[in-house]
Image: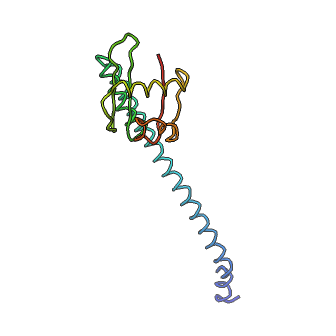
Amino acid sequence: MSSHDQHSINEPSYEELLKQYRDLQLRVTRFSAIEQELINTRDRLDHELVLHQRLHRYNSDALKAPDESYFFQIEAEAIVDVFEMEGSLVVFIPMNGRTPGFFAEGVSLPSLNQSILDSIYALGKKYPLGKCAILKSETLNLDAFFLPIRRGSFRAFQ
C-alpha cells in the first residue's frame, strides 16, 4: 500500500465532513438557545429580586410609620414602586368621623370633597369588603371623578 492510499483512507470524505459540520451547527444552535434562555431567566430573577427589595423597603417604612398619614402616603408610593403602576390613590375614611385622608402618587387629582367621597363610596358598595377587584375603564368611566384613570385595583376594608 502506498503512502498516498494510506493518507486517503484516514481522511474523511466530503459527505462525512458535511455531516460533522451540520452536527456541529446543530449543537451551536442548541447551545445558543440554551444560553438565551439562561439570560432571560437571569433577567427575570434580577427583576424579581428588585421587586422583593422594594417590598422589603415598603414593609420596613410601614412598620416605622409614626402616624396614619405617613403610613398611607408610603402605601400610595409603594403601589407605584412595587407594582410598577403609573399612579395610585389611597383614600382613608376613618370610622370615627375624623376627616378622610386622600393620598396620591403619580396622579394629579382634585382636592378631596363630598362629591369625590360619594363616588368612592358608590364604587365601594359594588364590591365586597376585603376583596380586591381589578377595574377597567368601562367601570371607572361611569363616574366623572374616575375618568382620568384607565384601570385600577380597588379594595375596601374596615
On the image, which quarter does residue 87 sit in? Answer: top left
Q: Position of residue 43 (x, y in %)?
A: 45, 48
Percent across and percent down for residue 95 are 41, 12
Q: Residue at x 40, y 33 (%)?
A: 79
The coloring applied to the image is rainbow
Depicted 110 relative to depicted 33: above or below = above
Residue 29 quadrant: bottom right
Residue at horizontal 64%, vertical 72%? 20
Q: How many marks?
A: 0
Q: Nearer the viewer, residue 75 or 156?
A: 156
Residue, far top: 96
Q: Nearer the viewer, residue 53 or 12?
A: 53
Residue 125 vertical position relative to residue 36 in the rendered view, above or below? above
Q: Residue at x 60, y 63 (%)?
A: 27
Image x and y of residue 24, in percent: 60, 68
Residue 152 x/y as whole percent = 46, 36
Residues 1 and 105: in front is 105
Decide if residue 24 is on the left or right side of residue 136.
right
Residue 151 vertical placement versus 100 (above, below) = below
Q: Quadrant of the N terminus?
A: bottom right
Question: What residue appears at the point 40 percent right and 38 percent down from the top-left corner?
Answer: 50
